[in-house]
Amino acid sequence: MTVLDSARLLVILAGAFMVVLDFFIVLVALPSIAIDLAATPGQLQLIVAGYGIANAAGLIAGGKLGDLLGRRRMFLAGMALFGVTSVGCGLSTSGLALVLMRFAQGAAGALLHPQVLALLGLNFPGDKRASAFAAYAMAMGLAGVAGQLLGGALIEINFAGTGWRSCFFINAPIAIAAIVLGVRLLDRETPPSAARQVDFWGMTLTAAALSCLIVPLTYGREALPGAVNVGLLLAAAALAAAFALSQRRRAAAGLAVMIPPSVLAAGHFRLGVGTVLVFYGGVASFYFVLGLHLQSTLGATALRSGMVFAVLGAAFFAASMSGGYLGRVLKRPLVELGALVLAAGHLLQLAVTLAGGGIAAMLGPLLVEGVGIGLVMAPLVSLALSRTPPQHAGVAAGILSTMQSTGNALGVAIVGLCYVAGLWLPAGLEAGNLRFAEALAALGALALVVWVLARRIRARAQTAA
């Protein structure tokens, strides 16, 4: 690539990098946020899950807005909104205010992120495309791994006394630079005159259903009466049913829909969607409870906590890079193998926790857990999309991206409940270790569910063949 191509690539990848980074960077900042803003455990869950809710609800609509109004224009608008909402997060003066700003930041990310893949295809045609998409995959992996380490370093540096707030403020100069350079470097395109409409009704129902489900599991436990929480859970079920019905009716009428029923009619794809949901729910919630456990129970600083996450990330990268070779040598499906390795890692971590082990004792199981995540993450999406008709490939990819964000939010809400509430409390074990052990037990079960679903996907594919 030329210098101009490299600059253009950095601008585009900055958008996707920031969106993914900001889900993870906040994890090591949660204990500091809890102290500074007097945020409750439920608010801490929503600070993470709320971002995922808004992102999940808006991804498909964000992609269609790019089709309708232009990917370059929506990329620049999304970058501006992401920068503004990031500053708003950093200026928050209460836990509730930060929760609301994280919802807004997630929505801005939903407008920004879908434009990245489209712009890569638009700006890097022909032989350049493979290199551009390889750089995209590397940037996504780096964002997930570097988030905690960067967040810990920023909190430790405490520039101008900003502490955890710098984890959000850092997005502003990046966004400004990306906008200035993007205006000059990104190719202009003419939006198709017959671009499809956006299913704002489906988007609204999705966001409402997810909110009604997750709020009672997080902040609602502390701030709302039990009857209200039950009512919200029932409303979530009703809204989900209304969403399914609206998708069928709109598709029958030839209107735009978020999830075409014809795509979900394939049993192979439905299983793939479920597997993605469970897997990402387990990964996001593992990062959530691990960050809290390292600082709140074991007393690690934010920087040391980030360094522990770097160990997990190193194992993840090693497994991702060698996954193809391992699959050929072991002659085992990587998703199934990785799910079993991940379950074994969680069980090893559970044993260390029950024995009262400290950070040093956790490193071995963390390596196993990182390998398991690395073996599953890369081939899972390929497995889910493997039998999708070409004409539905774009929509199916959008659905899977939505399920990733939805899984992130649901996992933090549900598995996080084991950690912040402590559902089983036998005597003789320190409370923080117990809560982490409960979460690890749930995470091990989720990894086994991924293994079962992956086996069913393979069996269905073999039967169809």
Image (tube, helix red, strand yellow):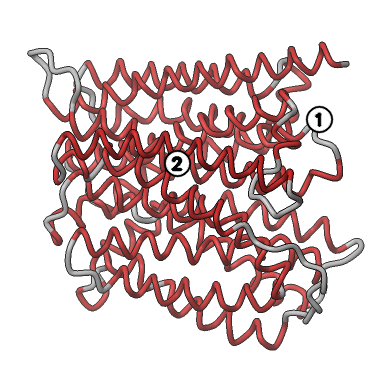
What number is the disc on residue 239?
2
- Near-viewer residue (82 or 14): 82
Where does the image place residue 272, in percent across and percent down from the top left? 65, 29
Name the residue: 51% across, 29% down. 278
Q: Which residue is mark 1?
A: 387
Name the residue: 65% across, 67% down. 65
Q: Is residue 310 left or right of residue 261?
A: left
Where does the image place residue 32, in percent across and percent down from the top left? 20, 56
Q: Judging from the image, what secondary structure is the residue with disc 2 in? A: helix
Q: Is residue 290 left or right of residue 120?
A: left
Name the residue: 49% across, 21% down. 447
What number is the disc on residue 331?
none
| Of the image marks 1 and 2, the number of the one nearer the N terminus | 2
**Dot 2, how many residues are within 10 Å of its Cα: few (below 14), some (14-19), or many (20+)?**
many
- Up the image or down, 155 lies above or below 368; here it is below
- Near-viewer residue (304 or 51): 51
Amino acid type at image mark 2: Leu
- Up the image or down, 82 lies above or below 339; here it is below
Q: CA distance from mark 1 to mark 2?
A: 30 Å
Quarter of the image that includes the C terminus? top right
Name the residue: 65% across, 61% down. 198
- Up the image or down, 331 lies above or below 131; here it is above
Where does the image place residue 16, in percent across and percent down from the top left? 58, 61
Where does the image place residue 194, in percent across and percent down from the top left? 82, 69
